[in-house]
Image: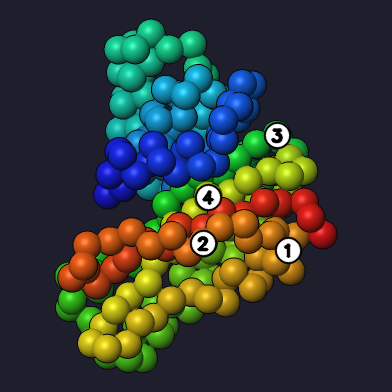
Amino acid sequence: MLPPKIARMIVNMGLGIDSVGKTLLDPFCGMGTICAEAALRGVNAIGSDIDSTSVEKAKKNMSWILSRYKLASSIRIFQADATHIDEYIDSNSIDTIVTEPLLGPTKLGAEHIHDVREIQNIMKGLEKLYIGCFRSWTNILKYNGVVVIAFPSFEVGKTVYSVKKVVDTCETLGYTKLLGPIIYGRPQAVVRRNFYLFKYGTR
């Protein structure tokens, strides 16, 4: 799970100093941590997730935080596949996307996978997922919209596996990498978060 302090940091990265009137999307919202931090910044938040149970929990969490802090922010939560999110959101309506997508199976983080081919197949699957997302997001981001996203890296033995192909592909889709990787993880962790910041609309 994404720690709230990290969620707050990446929300701030995505929104910048001036957040007035902005709309933030988290297409892998889980139980709503990023949307909650966005609401606390006073922006309108949209969250989606492919898992219906997570969506229901996120809705309850958002209702609580709006009531607890008497926030005027608008928060919309719904179920959707992140690679087809443009089917549910108006074109050119999102200022920033801040998200931690699926980072791989939990059994990998628990060091239950050591087969090189299986790890490589996992990475290929994640690359396909991320590229599909970035392609869909081109339809909903405003010109000069921002994406802050965590990509995983896996350290198994002395080998580090990552999704380097995604960064290169993003640039062909019209994104420019402004920051990253900013690495976050415990010293002995198998899975580490690598945060990137992209700007869209530079092609």
Residue 84 visible to an observer of this rendering: no
Query: How far apart in space, not on screen, are marks 3 and 1 (Cα)?
Result: 18 Å
Residue annotated with mark 4: 148
Placement of 124 over or under 199, stated as above or below: below
What secondary structure is marked by label 2?
strand
In front: label 3 or label 4: 4
| Residue bearing the label numbered 3 | 93
- Distance, label 3 to label 4, CA atoms, is 17 Å
Q: Which mark is residue 173?
A: 1
Q: Earlier in the sequence, mark 3 or mark 2?
A: 3
Which kind of residue does numbered mark 2 sit on?
Answer: Gly
The residue indicated by pointer 2 is: 180
In the rendered structure, which disc, 2 or 4, sits on the residue that comes first in sequence? 4
Q: Nearer the viewer, residue 81 or 201?
A: 201
Per the model, the C-alpha gap separating discs 1 and 2 is: 18 Å
Gap in Å between the C-alphas at discs 2 and 4?
10 Å
Residue at (60% x, 40% y) in the render: 96
User: Element under label 1?
Assistant: loop
| Quarter of the view holding residue 140 | top right
What sort of colour scheme is used for the picture?
A: rainbow
State the quadrant of the C terminus.
bottom right
Which callout, 1 or 2, points to the residue nearer the camera? Answer: 2
